[in-house]
Image (spheres, rainbow, N blue to C red):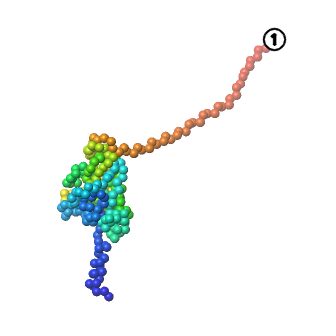
Amino acid sequence: MPSIAATFAIVGTLLPALASAHIRAYTPGIWGGNSDGSLENPLNANTQNFFCAGRKKDTSGQRSVLTAGKTFRMGVACGEAAGNVANAPQSCANDPNAYHNGGGCGLAISYNQNPKRSSDFTLFSVVHDCPNKNTGFIDFKIPDNLPAGDAVCSWTWIPDPSGAGNEMYMNCFNCRITAGPSGARIVSGPKPLQWAVPGSPNGGERPLYKNKFKNGAQTLVVSGGSGGAKPTPKPTPKPTPTKQPAKPKPSSTRRVVVVTVTVYV
């Protein structure tokens, strides 16, 4: 029979495999780097430097390129998937609770190169089924009129209350928007959600992206600029042919000719 000490030693060797994992974003230009597993850590009321997970702006020169009117694929997976996001369903299988029953994720943008707060960002894309334990990648639809230029983007996620406590996640990354209107600016648009961090609500109804916003590209009001992606035209529906009424058949009528004959005697 193994001793109690030996039993604890065995349990201790198993703990790393059962360690609690969480979710982070993976993309070029991310603040903190794609190999930093601690970017998956949740942000809560005790996280004083929560903004962009407390990371400084990436200075590697890398940027994620997003094309207006197209789809941007980004890695969204647990910290154990660093280096091989495609293998996330297997890498994160040791802790399926890392996905906290989803809740929806959002992408936001700031054309201020040094944003300081969440209000500096405008939400432009939402995926309701995010994060997803069946894949390491999430496809975000980009609005046709998202202005072109270099910017800072953020990924945020507030987990479903059925799977997590009061916490949120935020990763920032340097980005470049192409094919959008050049020289334009966003006049109005939705703001990214913020929850359970200093300066935010920490109780009551939890705001979830899947409940607060439509799935896909968000509606933005943009002013100025030129060019940009043209929205895909909707196919013109073919007119339904109308059935022509049948021509009436000529009725067969019999002509009666009356001949009057006068006889003189």
Q: Judge by depth and name the residue closer to the eye, 178 or 116.
A: 178
Q: Quadrant of the rendered structure where residue 230 is?
A: top left
Q: Quadrant of the N terminus?
A: bottom left
Viewed as shown, does residue 109 lie left or right of 215?
left
**Percent position (x, y) of residue 52?**
23, 58
Q: Quadrant of the rendered structure where residue 203 is?
A: bottom left
**Outermost residue, front side:** 61
**Percent position (x, y) of residue 11?**
29, 79
Viewed as shown, does residue 73 lie left or right of 254?
left
**Percent position (x, y) of residue 107?**
29, 54
Q: Is residue 4 above or below residue 96?
A: below
Q: Residue at x 36, y 52 (%)?
A: 71
Q: Residue at x 25, y 53 (%)?
A: 152
**Percent position (x, y) of residue 68?**
33, 48
Q: Residue at x 23, y 62 (%)?
A: 43
Q: Is residue 12 above or below residue 44?
A: below
Viewed as shown, does residue 121 lie left or right of 264?
left
Q: Quadrant of the rendered structure where residue 246 is?
A: top right
Structural crowding at the residue carrying mark 1, measured as other residues with C-alpha within 10 Å and reported as few (<14), some (14–19) or many (≥20): few
Q: Quadrant of the C terminus?
A: top right
**Outermost residue, top side:** 265
Q: Residue at x 31, y 41 (%)?
A: 226
Res 12 visible: yes
The residue that mark 1 highlights is 265
Q: Report the amino acid beneath label 1.
A: Val
Q: Judge by depth and name the residue closer to the eye, 113 or 201.
A: 113
Q: Judge by depth and name the residue closer to the eye, 109 or 43.
A: 109
Res 191 visible: no
- Label 1's element? loop
